Image (cartoon, coloured by chain):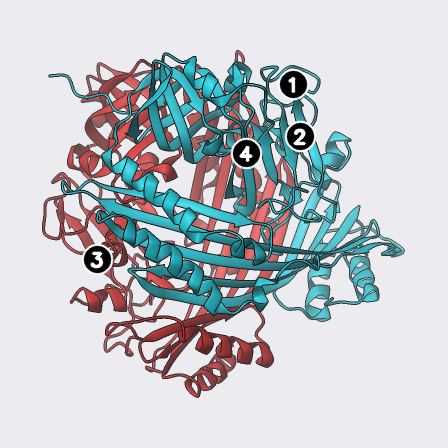
C-alpha cells in the first residue's frame, strides 16, 4: 500500500504544485445475535485512496476504491481537473511536516487476536444477561458486537509521512420491556479500544434496567423544572455543542461560540476537553487527517472558552496554530475540522447526591430527535423520557414530553456535574444538573 | 458487466458448497460528482468512483456476509469461501443456473450526469448562491451543494435471478444562515432532488430552491417562540411526508414486524388508521427520489398499498422477512452499498390525497398550529412515540393563518395520530431525504396531503413566571 501511495504521490506531483495521498484499509467484523443464535455475521476488508492537489491555492479532490495503476492515474487526473474550478486564498495549502514528534498511541492487539467464536460468545452473553434480568423483558430488539481495524497512510509533497494502525470494538443491546400492555424500550452500548475492557453482562443489564424503569411512564403537565441529565443524555447535548467548537464553523459564522473566545460562556463547574492522546480513547490517534500531531486541547476551563478546534487552514486564517483536529471521514471525504475524544470533565457529586439535592425535577435518561436541535443558534426542542424526582427521590417514569430552550443558556445554568463521567464511543460526559427548563406535556 | 454469467454461477456455487439455502452476489459501481460553494467561493469540487462486491449466504434464516472492494474473481471467490466456511454440511455442490435474466440498461432519454461538464454544475450552484446573497442584508452565510450519483448494480442469486439496474440521482441543496441586529441567528434549508439524469436540473430553477430557503430563514428570524401544550395541528401538504415516514412507515417494515418489534404486527385486516387514511409505498414513480427499477435484491420495485381507508393491508418486506412471514415479495429490500446486507426499506411513501379542500380545513380551526414545513424527526418503532421539528410553523387564529413561530416540535404517538386524523386534503406535496436504519442510509421520498390532527403536543417555550 505504501508503494502504491508513493507512486500516486509522484504522479500527482508531476501534474500539480502540491499533492497529498491518503490511503485507508479497513477490516470490519460485525455480529448480530437474536434468540441465542447468530443472525448476521459480516467479515470484510475494503480499501480506498483519496488525492488532494493544489494548483496555486486552488484545491482539487478525487477518490477511488480501485487501487489499480490505471484507476489511480484517472483519479489523479480528475483531482487536477477539479482544482481548476475552485477558489482558494492565501491560507490554503498543505501543512509542512511537523517539527515535533507524534504522540505514542499504542495499538491494542487484543481485538485482532481474539477469535470470531469468542466474539460471538460475548454478544450472546450480552443478550442473555439482558433477557434474564427480569420476566418483563419481552424482546431483544438488537444485540451485537462489532470491531474495526484500520490502517491509514498520509503522504504529501511537504514531507508528511504517517502510517498508523488503530482499532476499536463495541457491543450494543436494544430491547423492549412489556407490562400490562405498556411497552418501553431500553438501549445500552459499550465501545472500547481494548477487547478486554468490554463488559457484555453490564451492557445487557443496563439496557434492561432502562426499559424496566420506564414501564408505566406517563406524560406530565407543562411546567418549568430543573433537569438532571444522566451521562448518556449529557453526552447527547455535548454532541450538539461539538460542531460549535470547530474553527471552520466559527469562521463561517456557523457556531454559537463565534466571537466568544475568553468569555465565560458556561457555568464555572464546566470543563470541556478534546484529547486524541487518551490511552483508552476510541478516537485516539497519533496524527490528525492532515498528518499533524494529535494533542490534548482544553476548550472550556471553568466555564471560560479557551480556544476553538483547528486544522492547518482554519488555524492560519484565524492567526493561531493548529490543534491537530483536521478530520477526514474516510478516503472519499475532504478535510474538515472535527473533535476526537471530546468530553466534559467529572465533578465531585455522585449521581445519588445530585438526585437528593432536588426538590422537584426530571431525571432525563432518553432524548428523541436530538439531531433536530439547531447547532448554530443553540435552540432546541426535543423529546425526552425519564424519571420524576420529588423530595430528593425518584418517583414515577415520564414519557411523551418535549424539553425546549437554548443550549448555551442550559450550559450557563448548570448547577453541578457528577463524578460519573462515562464515554459513549468518542464523546463522554458526567451527569449534569441544570436550572429550570420548559418541559411541554399535557 | 464485471463478471461473466459462468463466473457468477461458479461464485454462487462456491458460496453454497458447504450448505445453505440461498446465495447472492451484489456488484456495485458508483460514480459521484459533488461541487459546493460557501463564503461566496467555490470551495469543493470532488469526484470519484467507489464500488465493490458483496456475497451473501442465508442458511437457516441466518445471514453471512462478506465483501471486497476488489473487482477480481479471486477476491470475490475469497468472500464466497468466507461465507461458505460458516457451514459444515456435505453437499454434492449446488447447481446454479442464471436463467431469469433481465439485463436492463438505463433509459435512453436520461442525460448521464457523468457526461455533463463540471462547468454547467458549477453554474447551477453559482446561480443559487448569487440569488441568495442578493435577497437580504441579514444573510450571513450561504452554502449551496450540487451532487450526482450514478450507481450501477448487478445482482445474481441462487434462485436463478440475474439483473442489472442503473440508478441515477441528482440533488441540489441550499442552506442559509441569517442574523439580525440583536444577534439572533437562524438557518433555513431547501432541497431539490430526483431519480433522474441531468435533464432534471436543466428543467428546474436553482433560484427557486434558494428562494424557499431564504424565505424560511427570514421568517424564522422574526418569528416568536412557539407556544407549548396540546392543540389542534394542521400539517400542510408542503410539509412533506416526514410524519407518514417516521410515525407510520417504519412500523410497516416486515423485518420489524417479524421480530415482534412493530406496533402494527399481527394487525392485517384490522383498522389501524382513520377511515380517511390510505398509505402507499411506490418504488416505481417516475423521477421520485426513492425510485429504482429493482430493489437491491433484484426484485422489481412496485406499488404497495399498505393501509387502505384505515385498514392494514400489508407490509413492505425484503426476501428474508417475506419468507419468515410467508408473503409475496414487495420489492423493498434495499441497502446503502455493497458493504451492507439488504434490509426492509421504504421507497416513496405517501398518504393518498382525500376529499377536503385544504383552505376549508384551516378555516374550521378556531385556535391551533399550522406546520407548513417539517424538519427532521425520530420515532421509537416499538412504542410508536415520535418527535418532529417544525422548520416553518404558524399559529391558526379564527380559521386564519396567523403569526409565524419558531422552535416548535410535534410529539405524539404514531398509531394514535393516524387513528385521529379527521381531515385529509385533496392536495399532495413531496419532500426528499436520506432515511437511516441499522446504520445504513438510503434515498427516499415522502409525501402527504394537508391533514388535520385534532390534538397533538406542541413543544415550545413557557415564559418564566414573575
From the image, state whether disc 3 or disc 4 is nearer to you: 4
Instruction: Residue B178 in the image: state x and y as whole percent.
Output: 25, 46
- Residue located beneath label 1 in the image: B309
Instruction: Residue A137 in the image: state x and y as whole percent.
Output: 53, 23
Q: Secondary structure at mark 2?
A: helix
- Residue located beneath label 3 in the image: A297
Which chain did the renderer colour cyan?
Answer: B
From the image, state the color of chain A: red
- Residue located beneath label 4 in the image: B447
Badge 3: few (under 14), some or many (20 or more) residues near its Cα, within 10 Å? Answer: some
Return the residue nearer the eye: A324 or B237: B237
Q: Chain of mark 4?
A: B
Q: Chain of mark 3?
A: A
Going from N to C along the chain, the mark reached first, 2 or 4, is 2
Say if mark 1 contacts mark 4, CB within 8 Å: no
Q: Residue at x 23, y 51 (%)?
A: A273
Q: Is B55 placed above or below B329 here?
A: below
- Residue located beneath label 2 in the image: B258
Q: CA distance from mark 1 to mark 3?
A: 59 Å
Amino acid at each position: 500500500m505504501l508503494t502504491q501511495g508513493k507512486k500516486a504521490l509522484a504522479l500527482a506531483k508531476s501534474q500539480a504544485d502540491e499533492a497529498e495521498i491518503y490511503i485507508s484499509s479497513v477490516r470490519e467484523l460485525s455480529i448480530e445475535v437474536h434468540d441465542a443464535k447468530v443472525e448476521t455475521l459480516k467479515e470484510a476488508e475494503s480499501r480506498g485512496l483519496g488525492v488532494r492537489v493544489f494548483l496555486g491555492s486552488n484545491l482539487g479532490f478525487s477518490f477511488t476504491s480501485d487501487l489499480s495503476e490505471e484507476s489511480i492515474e484517472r483519479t489523479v487526473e480528475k483531482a487536477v481537473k477539479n482544482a481548476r474550478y475552485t477558489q482558494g486564498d492565501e491560507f490554503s495549502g498543505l501543512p509542512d511536516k511537523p517539527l515535533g514528534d507524534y504522540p505514542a498511541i499504542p495499538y491494542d492487539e487484543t481485538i485482532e487476536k481474539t477469535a470470531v467464536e469468542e466474539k460471538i460468545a460475548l454478544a450472546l452473553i450480552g443478550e442473555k444477561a439482558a433477557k434474564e434480568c427480569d420476566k418483563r423483558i419481552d424482546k431483544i430488539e438488537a444485540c451485537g458486537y462489532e470491531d474495526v481495524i484500520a490502517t491509514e497512510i498520509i503522504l504529501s509533497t511537504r514531507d508528511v509521512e504517517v502510517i498508523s494502525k488503530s482499532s476499536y470494538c463495541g457491543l450494543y443491546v436494544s430491547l423492549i420491556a412489556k407490562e400490562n400492555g405498556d411497552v418501553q424500550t431500553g438501549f445500552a452500548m459499550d465501545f472500547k479500544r481494548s477487547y478486554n475492557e468490554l463488559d457484555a453482562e453490564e451492557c445487557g443489564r443496563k439496557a434492561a434496567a432502562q426499559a424496566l424503569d420506564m414501564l408505566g411512564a406517563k406524560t406530565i403537565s407543562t411546567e418549568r423544572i430543573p433537569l438532571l441529565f444522566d451521562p448518556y443524555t449529557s453526552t447527547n447535548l455535548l454532541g450538539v455543542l461539538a460542531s460549535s467548537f470547530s474553527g471552520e464553523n466559527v469562521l463561517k459564522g456557523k457556531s454559537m461560540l463565534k466571537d466568544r473566545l475568553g468569555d465565560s460562556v458556561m457555568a464555572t463547574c464546566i470543563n470541556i476537553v478534546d484529547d486524541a492522546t487518551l490511552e483508552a480513547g476510541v478516537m485516539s490517534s497519533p496524527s490528525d487527517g492532515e498528518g499533524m500531531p494529535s494533542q490534548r486541547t482544553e476548550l472550556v476551563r471553568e466555564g471560560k472558552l479557551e480556544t476553538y478546534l483547528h486544522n492547518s487552514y482554519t488555524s492560519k486564517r484565524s492567526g493561531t496554530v493548529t490543534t491537530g483536529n483536521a478530520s477526514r471521514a474516510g478516503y472519499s471525504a475532504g478535510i474538515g475540522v472535527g473533535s476526537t475524544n471530546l468530553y466534559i470533565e467529572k465533578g465531585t457529586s455522585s449521581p445519588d447526591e445530585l438526585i437528593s439535592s432536588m426538590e422537584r425535577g426530571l431525571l432525563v435518561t432518553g432524548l428523541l430527535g436530538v439531531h433536530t436541535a439547531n447547532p448554530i443558534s443553540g435552540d432546541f426542542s426535543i423529546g425526552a423520557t425519564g424519571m420524576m424526582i420529588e423530595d430528593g427521590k425518584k418517583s414515577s417514569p415520564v414519557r411523551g414530553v418535549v424539553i425546549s430552550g437554548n443550549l448555551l443558556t442550559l450550559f450557563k445554568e448548570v448547577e453541578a456535574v457528577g463524578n460519573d463521567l462515562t464515554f459513549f464511543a468518542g464523546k463522554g460526559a458526567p451527569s449534569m444538573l441544570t436550572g429550570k427548563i420548559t418541559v411541554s406535556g399535557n | 458487466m464485471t463478471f461473466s454469467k459462468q463466473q457468477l454461477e461458479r461464485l454462487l456455487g462456491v458460496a453454497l458448497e458447504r450448505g445453505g439455502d440461498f446465495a447472492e452476489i451484489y456488484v456495485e459501481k458508483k460514480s459521484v460528482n459533488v461541487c459546493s460553494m460557501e463564503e461566496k467561493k467555490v470551495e469543493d469540487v470532488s469526484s470519484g468512483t467507489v464500488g465493490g462486491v458483496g456475497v451473501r449466504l442465508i442458511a437457516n434464516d441466518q445471514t453471512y456476509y462478506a465483501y471486497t472492494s476488489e473487482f477480481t474473481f479471486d477476491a470475490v471467490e475469497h468472500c464466497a469461501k468466507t461465507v461458505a466456511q460458516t457451514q459444515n454440511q456435505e453437499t454434492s455442490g449446488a447447481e446454479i443456473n442464471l436463467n431469469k435474466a433481465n439485463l436492463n440498461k438505463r433509459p435512453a432519454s436520461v442525460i448521464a450526469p457523468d457526461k455533463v461538464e463540471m462547468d454547467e454544475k458549477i453554474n447551477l450552484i453559482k446561480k443559487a448562491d448569487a440569488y441568495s446573497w442578493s435577497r437580504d442584508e441579514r444573510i450571513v452565510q450561504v452554502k449551496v451543494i450540487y451532487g450526482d450519483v450514478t450507481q450501477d448494480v448487478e445482482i445474481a442469486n441462487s434462485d436463478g435471478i440475474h439483473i442489472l439496474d442503473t440508478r441515477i440521482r441528482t440533488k441540489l441543496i441550499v442552506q442559509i444562515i441569517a442574523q439580525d441586529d440583536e444577534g439572533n441567528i437562524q438557518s433555513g434549508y431547501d432541497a431539490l432532488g430526483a431519480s433522474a439524469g441531468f435533464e432534471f436540473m436543466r428543467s428546474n430553477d436553482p433560484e427557486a430552491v434558494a428562494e424557499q430557503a431564504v424565505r424560511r430563514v427570514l421568517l424564522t428570524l422574526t418569528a416568536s417562540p412557539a407556544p407549548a401544550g396540546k392543540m389542534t395541528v394542521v400539517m400542510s401538504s408542503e410539509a412533506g411526508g416526514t410524519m407518514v415516514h417516521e410515525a407510520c412507515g417504519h412500523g410497516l417494515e416486515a423485518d420489524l414486524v417479524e421480530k415482534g418489534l412493530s406496533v402494527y404486527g399481527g394487525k392485517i385486516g384490522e383498522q389501524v388508521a382513520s377511515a380517511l387514511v390510505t398509505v402507499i409505498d411506490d418504488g416505481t414513480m417516475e423521477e421520485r427520489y426513492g425510485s429504482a427499477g429493482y430493489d437491491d435484491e433484484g426484485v422489481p420495485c412496485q406499488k404497495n398499498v399498505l393501509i387502505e381507508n384505515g385498514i392494514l393491508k400489508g407490509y413492505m418486506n425484503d426476501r428474508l422477512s417475506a419468507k419468515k412471514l410467508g408473503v409475496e415479495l414487495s420489492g423493498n429490500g434495499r441497502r446503502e452499498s455493497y458493504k451492507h446486507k439488504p434490509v426492509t426499506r421504504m421507497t416513496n411513501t405517501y398518504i393518498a390525497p382525500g376529499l377536503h379542500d385544504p383552505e376549508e380545513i384551516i378555516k374550521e380551526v378556531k385556535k391551533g398550529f399550522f406546520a407548513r414545513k417539517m424538519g427532521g424527526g425520530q420515532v421509537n418503532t416499538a412504542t410508536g412515540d415520535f418527535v418532529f421539528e417544525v422548520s416553518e410553523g404558524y399559529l391558526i387564529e379564527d380559521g386564519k393563518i396567523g403569526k409565524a413561530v419558531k422552535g416548535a416540535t410535534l410529539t405524539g404517538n404514531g398509531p394514535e395520530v393516524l387513528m385521529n386524523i379527521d381531515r385529509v386534503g385533496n392536495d399532495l406535496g413531496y419532500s426528499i431525504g436520506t432515511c437511516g436504519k441499522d446504520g445504513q442510509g438510503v434515498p427516499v421520498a415522502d409525501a402527504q396531503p394537508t391533514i388535520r390532527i385534532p390534538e397533538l403536543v406542541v413543544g415550545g417555550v413557557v415564559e418564566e413566571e414573575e
